Image (cartoon, helix red, strand yellow):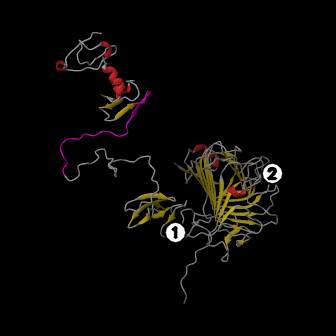
Amino acid sequence: MVDQYKKLSELTELSMPSNGDILYIVHNPATFPIDNKITFYNLLKDWKTSVIVDTKDNILIMTPTTGWVAYATDTKRFYIYDGTNWQEGATQFSIQTANPNIGVEQNESRQGYGSDYITDKVLTYCIIGGSGDDKEGSIRVINGLFQIYLNNKWNNIVSNFILREDSLGNFELEHAPAGFEWYYEVFSGNSDIIGIDGKPIIQQYTSSMGAYQPDLQLDGGSF
Amino acid sequence: MATYYISPTGNDTTGNGTLANPWQTLAKFLSSSIAGDTCICAAGTYTFTNATFTNRIIQGAIGGANTSTAGWTVFDGGSADVGWDVSNGITIINNIWFLNIIGATKSLIHLNVDFSGDLTVNSCRFSNCTAYSSTTFLGLIGIDQHYTGGPGIVHITIQGCIFDDIDFAGGNYPAYFCMRGAPIGSTFNWYNNVFIIRTALTGAPNGLFTAYGGPAVFTFKNSIFRNLQTALNFIGTYDVPTKFTAINCSFDANIPPGSITKTDCLTNTNPLFINENNGNFNLRPTSPCIDTGTIV
């Protein structure tokens, strides 16, 4: 280890000290008492405000003291050392230039996380919860129903419609109503579940108790 | 998923399981098929023998007679102690008439709650079968393994079936269905069934359904309970209020539903079958059960 003294005006580059090296910043090295020299490294240790800038892989192998902050040039995320591990910040940084945007808006979120919006994202493994926000386009799941707020009211979103091919090759439009287990042919109201006598167990959205459903009585009105 | 055919006039040796050249026995289908395959059983009578299978669809003939086995696919046990084990998979049984199956040590259909399994039984008839055995907790259809709840979640759906003249006179915990230890998440749904009791429950305790241990719940919808002998029979044993729910069901005077949870049910009601003594369970035009069910 060799002490090298340079004037600030003579400094062309400033390197971080490596193990065993001590970098002093002093006013006048000839007259400054050695005991009062403040090592740059000690300053760095105590300040905890310096930011390491490097790739993520290089950052993660460092083991500084608690509170060190790092910025990864490849992942564009901040990291902070908790004494054991590096904790990764959730958001990334985006390039911002001095050039203005075309148009009115100049404060857009380039990551898509605005103060009151989220855009250009794919939601996976998410759950739609409840909502009391009666605004056009609000969505919610409530009491087993998926709803959207349109035309000043909450509307149920209907699903579970299928086209089922019968034995003759014809297709029937069937629906499984929310909260019910079986499919029903939409126009006839007959279940696709056939009973013991070969007839649908549910007919015209009506069921009788038991295994046999009575024959339908067609009402021709009165004479 | 392939479909194979069996017929009482088929041949396990020379047949190939096609419609034109069917096999004769269910055993031949089971040994020749894989998971997801369907067995179309032509009308007629087959011998009901022991079998262990799962992930199969057994489809009988549709539209058999009301008061006889004519036109039905019948599996006749010949009073032997036989049963099917359908644990650990998905099994669907449609339009089969199970006859003369006296399971002294077996359930007619059995699941083991060490394994998960789904069983759906549609539009079948069960007659002259026993609902008891010398072994506790089997029943006509039974699942059992662990008193406190086994690891295997099961889903049982019995719909559109007729249970007539099932023998409850003996054994331990005779029951249409005996469940011991199915874990939470298991379901037992009974929709649009007819239960005709002609013999008294003399095995102990009295209950047409046994739920012994485990948190599972029986749900009955659109089902008719008709007791043609004088002794009272009860719906369930053990934890009755919490384990049995009846929705739009009919109970006659000799089957008091007791403290089970009921919604829109008929009690002390004769369902008015056309001829319950000869097995015609169509409803008369004046039946209180017409149009008083609920959609499922």
Image spot of residue B15 (x, y percent): 59, 48
Horizontal side of residue A218 vs A211, given as left or right? left
Give the crowd class for mark 2: few <14, some 14-19, many >=20 residues within 10 Å. many
- The residue type indicated by label 1 comes to Gly
Whether residue A22 is visible, yes or no, is yes
Determine which quarter of the picture holds residue A48. top left
Mark 2 on the same chain as mark 1? no
Would you say B74 lies left or right of A20 here? right
Q: Could you tell me the amino acid type at mark 2?
A: Gly
Task: Estimate how packed mark 1 is, as few (under 14), some (14 to 19) or many (20 or more) residues with alpha carbons within 10 Å.
Answer: some
Q: Can residue B13 be seen in this view?
A: no
Q: Magenta region: which residues?
A: A81-102
Q: Which of A218 and B58 is in front in this view?
A: A218
- Viewer-side residue, B252 vs B43: B252
Point out residue B42 in the picture as x, y percentages from the top left corner.
61, 57
Residue at 32 percent of width and 31 percent of height:
A72
Left or right of B52? Residue A34 is left
Q: Where is residue A210 in the image (x, y as percent from the top left)?
A: 65, 66
Q: Label 2, on which residue?
A: B171
What residue is shown with label 1?
Answer: A189
Task: Name the residue rendered at 43%, 64% in the picture.
Answer: A154
Residue B125, magenta (yes or no): no
Q: Residue A100 in magenta?
A: yes
Q: Residue A12 carries which label?
A: none
Q: Say above or below: A50 vs B2.
A: above
The kind of secondary structure element at disc 1 is loop
Position of residue A182 relative to residue A26, above or below, is below
* Between B85 and B29, the one nearer to me in the picture: B85
